[in-house]
Image (cartoon, rainbow, N blue to C red):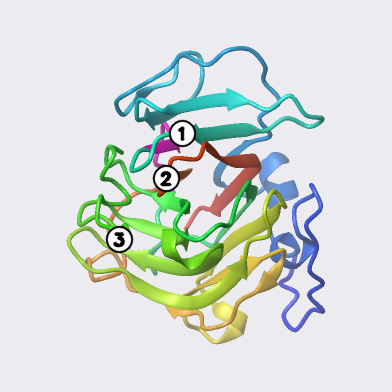
Amino acid sequence: MSARYGANFTADTLRKPSDGLWGDCPLDDYFAGRVGGTYMADDFTHTGPITAVTTDAHLIGMPYMAFNSSGGTHTFADVQGGALVCTEATDNEASYVRTNGWPFQITALGGDLWAEWRIKVNAITDNQIGFISGFWDNTAMSVVVPLSTANPPVMATTGEFVGFWGREEDAGLVRFIYKASGVTEVVMVTSAHQFVADTYVKFGVKFSKNYQQSGLPKLEGYVNGVPLGSPKQIPDNTGTDFPADVRLGWMFGHRLGAGTSSLTTCDWFKIFQKDA
């Protein structure tokens, strides 16, 4: 399937993956065995209790690692279509989920990559929720990682990340960023999205080795199927401020900035990377 450069991108928040992001993805060829690649997805249609964790640990019976502070829980939402919920009820504590696998690598030497997830927060009050979701390496999460105990929290020194960060102090405003371990994050788009409380948004990431037939390997963020612009030219795996030299999985969650129980809910996520 050829890329649809210059397509008309129409924003939508529906449960389906966004045409504007996935329109040139060879998933049908992958499932038919004609294209090699790596696929990871979950619609969270499971039910039942989830074993509580208070350290970065494996969620029993699920292909995920997770962290909860004492005031946090992970639960399945009782809704049509399913969803996974991180809840935190104690100020300065956190709840996160990350994939128990890190098969993707965003590097000039790697294959094209498509990723999208549908997610919401239940509140956008200033200084209440520090939201984060995107690609994360195999760094253990804790009450100080990936968001620190600073007031307001900042990105922790450790950990490699590419994705979306809604800072606690920004009342639902979300940035598109990247960072390598030991390096200060770089903001690609300052105003990527403005959350509306308890309203889903679809965040996405797309890496193209030949971005719009330019011959350059670039990464771009998407919101509701529409590209954000300001694409980042990606280096090879030599290691810079961009985490091109590490394998990545996916994560979501939040750190609480007030003593009000708050939720981050993920409806689904979907990632495909074509073999180089």
Q: Secondary structure at mark 3?
A: loop
Residue 111 badge: none
Question: Few, some or many C-alpha atoms within 10 Å of disc 2 (few <14, some 14-19, many ≥20)?
Answer: many
Magenta includes 103? yes
For image coordinates 64% across by 48% down, the residue present is 119
Magenta segment boundaries in residue numbering: 94-104
Q: CA distance from mark 1 to mark 2?
A: 7 Å
Answer whether labels 1 and 2 touch (C-beta < 8 Å): yes
Q: Position of residue 276 (x, y in %)?
A: 47, 58
- Name the residue beneath numbered marker 3: 154
For image coordinates 64% across by 49% down, the residue present is 120
Magenta includes 208? no
- The disc, 3 or 2, on the residue closer to the chain's N-terminal end is 3
- The disc, 3 or 1, on the residue closer to the chain's N-terminal end is 1
- The disc, 1 or 2, on the residue closer to the chain's N-terminal end is 1
Q: Secondary structure at mark 2?
A: strand
Q: In the rendered view, does 83 fall on the left or right side of 65?
A: right
- Name the residue beneath numbered marker 2: 256
Q: Quadrant of the N terminus?
A: bottom right
- Name the residue beneath numbered marker 1: 89
Q: Is residue 21 above or below residue 118?
A: below
Among the 4 quarters of the image, the one containing residue 160: bottom left
- Residue kind at label 1, given as amino acid type: Ala
Q: In the rendered view, does 186 fall on the left or right side of 42?
A: left
For image coordinates 72% across by 52% down, the residue present is 199
Q: Position of residue 7 (x, y in %)?
A: 79, 79
Q: Is residue 187 above or below residue 1?
A: below
For image coordinates 67% across by 20% down, the residue present is 46
Q: CA distance from mark 3 to mark 1?
A: 20 Å
- Residue kind at label 3, given as amino acid type: Val
Q: Is residue 20 visible?
A: yes
